[in-house]
Amino acid sequence: MVFSIEQDGTALSVAIEGHLDLESSPVIDKELAGRLDGITHLVIDMAGVDYVSSMGLRLLLSLMKRMSKQGTMVVRHVNGDVMELFDDSGFSQILTIEPDDRPAGER
């Protein structure tokens, strides 16, 4: 798991690669805990995510709940397998998911 964080004013973007699971979710959660104060727009870029476990879903839900109190959260670049998980779990109904508009060769 690799992730990067970029801030631009009150917007924060988190790009994740690999698995969003029991190992990576607490690391990302801890890193973001102190960085969300004053953030009004959070973007989770999942272009490099190929697997999400229940702990990954829990992290996304926790972030969404926090951001709903102080701004917005958007999930981007979700691949087909992860989108299927979001659909099956009902997360596609509660998360704001932007369509993956990248060319097919970049997905």
Image (spheres, grey):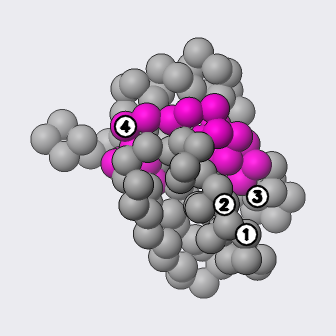
Report x, y in % for residue 88: 59, 15
Q: CA distance from mark 2 to mark 4?
A: 19 Å
Q: Residue at x 53, y 53 (%)?
A: 24
Q: Residue at x 72, y 53 (%)?
A: 63
Q: CA distance from mark 4 to mark 3?
A: 24 Å
Q: Which residue is mark 4?
A: 50
Q: Residue at x 37, y 47 (%)?
A: 18
Q: CA distance from mark 2 to mark 3?
A: 13 Å
Q: Is there CB contact under 8 Å for labels 1 and 3?
A: no
Q: Residues within 10 Å of mark 3 (few under 14, many from 20)?
A: some
Report x, y in % for residue 104: 18, 37
Disc 2 marks which amino acid?
A: Asp
Disc 1 marks which amino acid?
A: Ala
Q: CA distance from mark 2 to mark 1?
A: 6 Å
**Residue 31 shown in magenta:** no
Q: Which residue is mark 1?
A: 33
Q: Earlier in the sequence, mark 2 or mark 4?
A: 2
Q: Earlier in the sequence, mark 1 or mark 3?
A: 1
Q: Nearer the viewer, residue 101 or 75?
A: 75
Q: Which residue is mark 2?
A: 29
The residue segment tinted magenta is: 45-63
Q: Residues within 10 Å of mark 4 (few under 14, many from 20)?
A: some
Element type where label 1 sits in the image: helix
